[in-house]
Image (tube, grey):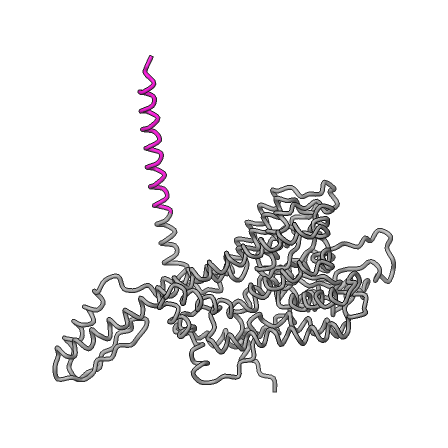
Amino acid sequence: MKSLSYYGKKLQHLCSALCSNLVCYVRATCFLISCFYKFTILRVHKFFVQLFYFIFISLFGFWILSILKPKSTNGDLNPTNLDLYFTSVSAVTVSSMSTVEMEVFSNSQLILITFLMLIGGEVFTSMVGLHLIRPKFKPWRKDSKIESVLSSAASSPRNSNFSDDIELDIVVLPDSPKPDLEKNEIQDDLRSSSDIQTLKYSSLKFLGVVALVYFLVMHILGISSVLVYLACVSSAKDVLRHKGLKTSTFVMFTVVSTFSSCGFIPTNENMGAFKQNSGLLLIIIPLILFGNTLYPACLRVSVWFLGKFFKKREANFLLKHSREIGHLHLFPGLHSRLLVVTVFGFISLQLFLFCTYEWNSSAMDGLNSSYQKVVGSFFQVVNTRHAGESVVDIAAVDPAVLVVLMAMMYLPPYTSFLPVKGDEESREEPLEKKKERGKVAENIIFSQLSYVVIFIILICITERKRLKEDPLNFSVFNIAFEVISAYGNVGFSTGYSCDRLLNPDPACKNKSYGFAGRWSDEGKMVLIIVMIFGRLKRFNMEWGKAWKLM
């Protein structure tokens, strides 16, 4: 018999060979990914990169959701494949539009939806965007380019102007009778440009670190705060116990959904199940603001604070040249302050109108004290831009207030009053100028509002039969509200009520999901397109200029 040492050496040799092959495979994979990144992603417009990202992730989420089993064993309650894909798209685009009740999903499915919301949130995708644009600012690895410019300058006529596009600056040679002096000046200019390039590249790395720290800190604080609240307040814990939800899953799901501005909550009533837990609502409100409308201001404060703490010169560069970096979420100082004023101005306006019209209405049912009503109203109006969590029945809200909510949902999250001209405005222009679209494209593309109207018309066409048979539920106003909510990636819905049927149907049962859950498959597919289109709406902010209303 062969000794054990012989087999041990054989096993060691086999493991060594496997590890060597694995290392080679990993290196080859990294090389292919790097080549794909350099020759594909960097040359493709950001719109198509993000479009592919959201479609691919939503298809991946649908595939996993279809594999995992739902909580319900009743076939009538199990979601269809279209409903699963609708839910996946809604989670990835952080829209929180629902066609099935949330309590149908099992714990494993809720964890998957949490992951989809996490990687689809604005803060996470902005960090991915920082990683994508960073190679554009990568400093020169060698001085070969400088030497080539110097040699070209030396061979050119003394009285001619020479320029070389080096991505950041245009270097112009001054007229000089002394070639050596001319050569030294060019070298100084190029080295200065190289220093700026290096500083921009390191500033982008620092900004990525700041965004990551901000992302982690907000989630850690949110999870910790909600866990402490649930441990101290038994009434909130009883809701989870009654619904069969795990505390860890609920906390992770709620915090990620809130900070990502999605609006999904793993209860059928959304946050209505916790409408009397004002402390929980007050914990969630800052997460809504810091993850969405106030993110640019918070990011700027984070850059300033970490820059002061670690004494980073990159922080000063980012604060003084915010728009030169080309990062959408880093605003100049004055713009950030005006954004904060605008956000709280909109909130104050909505809060005044909501309390004025709804204080004694049925929408406030379940809110017993004035304190609970104020906190509940504040929570509701904060969610219109653009988280979509709710403590009241949207269908019971006054129509005048619903119109205001529609306007707030339509506005982009970074809408601000910015009456500033000159230097502040010029700094908002990124260094990398956008390429002008062709004349044909400029003349045929529409504005954002035009596309919203087109989507409403398409939904009215797909649901034209129910518009006649059930006009109270399938009203044009309710359809427009649903489409604008999906386009704004909010998630508010007027729902569907069997009590509003003109011809009562004994088989009709009220469900705790959105109005879109009662639409036809064609209507749901159109709304899926609306959610994806709305998630990418920042790319069409300037569209429709060729159309003039006279």
Which residues fall within the magenta stretch? 1-29
At a point 54% along the width and 79% down the height, the residue shown is: 545
Q: Position of residue 268 (x, y in %)?
A: 72, 53
Identify the residue at the far bottom of this view: 550
Q: Quadrant of residue 96?
A: bottom right
Q: Main secondary structure of the magenta part?
A: helix
Identify the residue at the far front of this view: 232
* Residue in the foreground of this view, choosing between 6 and 499: 6
At a point 30% along the width and 75% down the height, the residue shown is: 169
Q: Quadrant of the N terminus?
A: top left
Q: Position of residue 395 (x, y in %)?
A: 77, 65
| Figure check: 235 above or below 69 | below
Q: Is residue 4 magenta?
A: yes
Looking at the image, can residue 396 be seen? yes
**Picture mark count:** 0
* Residue in the foreground of this view, choosing between 190 and 278: 278
